[in-house]
Each structure stands twice: as C-alpha cells, then as structure tokens.
Image (cartoon, rainbow, N blue to C red):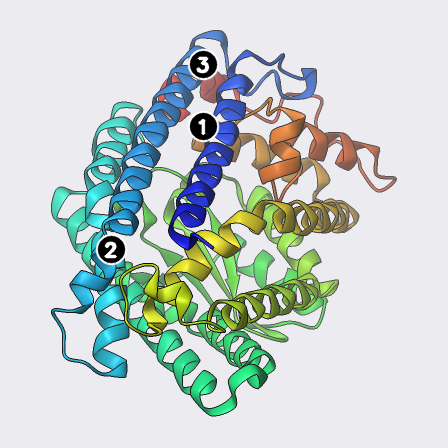
Amino acid sequence: MNYKLLVIILLCVIFLYKLMVTFLKLRSTRNKIPANVSDIYDAATYEKWCAYRVEKCRLSIISSCVSLATEIVLIAADLYAAFAGLFPNGLVPQLFAVLLLSVLTEVVVMPFNYYDTMKIEEKYGFNRTKKGTFFIDQLKEIVISLGILTLITWILALLHRALGDWMIVAFAGVLMVFFLLLLFLFPLFTRIFNKFTPLEEGELRTKLTNLLTKHGFTVRAIEVMDASKRSTKANAYFAGFGKTKSIVLYDTLIEKLTPDEICGVFAHELGHGVHKDTLKGQTASLIQMLLLSTLAWLTLRSESVFTAFGFDKINYGFAVILILSVEFAIIAPLYGILVNAISRRHEYRADRFATEEGYGADLISALKKLTQTDFGDVAPSPALILLEYSHPSLSQRIDAIEAAPAFTAKSADSPVSEEAADDPSEA
C-alpha cells in the first residue's frame, strides 16, 4: 500500500471538510434573522458583523491552505525522518525530534494568528492584547503543547514495547487519567496567562453563593479574571470537581451584565452540575480515548507504515502525528455530530433548570448581551449547527426557555438595551 499517497489524500479530504464548514459560516451572513433575536443587532451593526465574519473566514481559508501545503511538503519530502536524523538515535530523542518539528510548523501559521488578533480583532474593537503579550502567549502554548505531547508519546512507547497488542486498554486508561488531570490542573494553567482577584463582597457575591449552597455545592472561591487585557469578549466558568466549586468571572462579564443576568448564566452552569452532565461527558471522552488507542494499535502494527515516510523503524512521535492529524481527524466529524447532539440536549436542560430557578428572563437577557458583545452568529445554518455546534442556536434556546412552564418574563421590554443596540462599539 502507498501509505504516503493515502495520507496526502486524507489530508486533502480533511481540508475540504474544513473548507465546507467555513463556507457554511459564510452562508450564515445571508440567512434570515429569526424574529426573537432581531433586536440584537441594528442594521449598521449587523452589516459590521457580516464584514467581520467574512474577514475571519477568508483568513481561515488562507491559513488552512498554508497549513495543508506545509504538511504535504513535510510528508512528501520525508522531512520528519530527515529532521529526526539530526538527533541522537534513541527512543526519547527520536520521538522528541519529530514532535518538535510538528510543533515548530505552527510558526508557519503564526503570522495569520497575529493578523487575526492584532488586525481583525483590533479593527472591530475586540482586541486588547499587546504585541509582547501575544508572542509570549504563543511561546507558552508551544512549550506546553510540546511538553504534553512528548509525555503522552513516551508513555505510548513504553506501553507498546511492554504490552504489544494489549496496550489498547492500558493506553486508553492512561489517556483518560491524563485528560482528567488536565481538567484538574486547568485552573493552574489559566494562572500562567492571567491574574485572578477575589470578587468583592456585595450583591453579586451573595447571590452566587446562595445559588450554589441552595443545591448543596460548596463555594471554594469566587474570582475575577483579567480577561480584558486580551479581549473585550466576556465569559465565565466553574472550576473544580464534585461538590466543591470555584467560580471564575471575566472582568468583561461583570462590566456587561447585571447581577441577576450573571446569576442566570451560573444557574445554567449549575444545571449541568445538578444533572451531572460533566460526569456523563466523561463517557464520551472515554470512547474517544479508546478510539485513539485503537488507532495507535493499528498504526504501530507494521514498520512499513514508517519506512514509507523515510524512517528505518517505528517512530512513536510520527505515529502520534498520524493518529491526531490524519486518522482521528478523518473520523472526528462523524464522532462530533453524535457528541454535539448529546451536548445540545444537555444545554436545553440546563437552560430549563435556570428557568425553574426563576432566572429564565435574566438568562435570555444575558445570552443576548453576550451574543452582541462577542459578535455571535444569530442565524447559523441548520447544517452548521448539526456539524459544529455543541449548543443550540440562540434563537432555539430562547424558544425553549419561553416555552418552559416555569418561564415568566420580568419585563416586556427588550433584554438588550436601546443604548447597546444602537452603539456598534458594544458589539
């Protein structure tokens, strides 16, 4: 079998799929806006959103073309094997060499990332990242990615050499533990990039604490993250396992939303916790780890896979590249359709929980403001939702919230203030 030709063909198929998704995003700029979200953007702001979407998609297409060309050159010219030949002959140096080259190829698309952040995001009023911060962040990401990939690949090599074909279950277990460890360490990683300060005492802190303790959760900390130093976009999340939770609020979120609207957002997140959606999501993660382990087993069964790319024997670093960038990437869309469909059901249920807590109208108001602030898509194509969305569209979520028996509108007025709707700088 001509493995090299097969890999190049698969890389092109993956590229074409991504291109199709990008065109679906562009198609959204021509879709009719549903009536229940028509108040988010005025005509001038929506025109600005369309221009923003078009610029982002065009850059994505160019960046993807460059990435594809880089990968094809590396594969066709056996450059992975040639680069590995510059390092000492040994398990760790050889796998590290290939992974290092793979990570360094990200430098090729760094100019596009820079243009996206410093030009497009800046043009539309979102960027607050300084040039120095951008490049330091890029360096941190490269170092962290290389460290994680090297560790995982080294474990794969040890398990394969020790267990042979029996490595599937063992490696899946290791990946799952590693995945959970990353979730546990996520708060630590975020502190590498951002600063956190305790939320001051007051109405918001009291309401958030009461909301969690009402359902048996212990609040370990409520902190504010300085997200505004990089972007105007707003977000928030829970951190922690089990009944002990930390709440992290972007400082931009506090600027944009009222205390009740923030509570509406967290009532939604609390719904995920009460229904154990995160725990259930680990089942999907376990299936993914088993898929990756099976692909590793298939890839490592024959040295001919590696000699086709210029290696004289199995190279575990190149195996990981094939698994992540080609093999799993080709089946990921089908897997994603199923996982996203389940996720959307969980989102509906979490919205319903927030509505039952009395925050239905506040959640709608918050979602509209966040969509406006983050320049979200208010009319995504159904095919795009099916393929890519882990959440229902905003219009679908509002319909479901307003249809819930517990829903009561706090006001007949639009949740998006007239000032915000008329001011493009708020988008």
In the rendered image, which quarter is residue 142 located in? bottom left
Is 109 placed above or below 263 here? above
Q: CA distance from mark 2 to mark 1?
A: 43 Å
Question: Quadrant where the C terminus lies?
Answer: top left
Closer-to-camera residue (191/323): 323
Q: CA distance from mark 3 to mark 1?
A: 14 Å
| Residue occupying the far right of the picture | 405
Dot 2 or dot 1: first in sequence order is 2
For the question of whether residue 200 can be seen, the reply is no
| Residue occupying the far top of the picture | 43
In the rendered image, which quarter is residue 166 located in? bottom right
Side of 239 where 350 appears, left or right? right
Q: Residue beneath label 3, please?
A: 422
Residue 279 position in % (x across, y down):
67, 68
Is 58 placed above or below 326 here? above
Q: Residue at x 40, y 67 (%)?
A: 304
Disc 1 residue type? Answer: Phe
Report the disc number at residue 375.
1
Q: Residue at x 23, y 50 (%)?
A: 77
How many residues crowd around disc 2 within 10 Å: few (fewer than 14), some, or many (20 or more)? some
Q: CA distance from mark 3 to mark 2?
A: 56 Å
Q: Residue beneath label 2, please?
A: 78
Is 15 placed above or below 249 here? above
Q: Secondary structure at mark 2?
A: loop
Disc 2 residue type? Answer: Asp
Disc 3 residue type? Answer: Asp
How many residues crowd around disc 1 within 10 Å: few (fewer than 14), some, or many (20 or more)? many
Closer-to-camera residue (29/410): 29
For the question of whether residue 414 can be seen, the reply is yes
Dot 3 or dot 1: first in sequence order is 1
Please count the marks in the image: 3
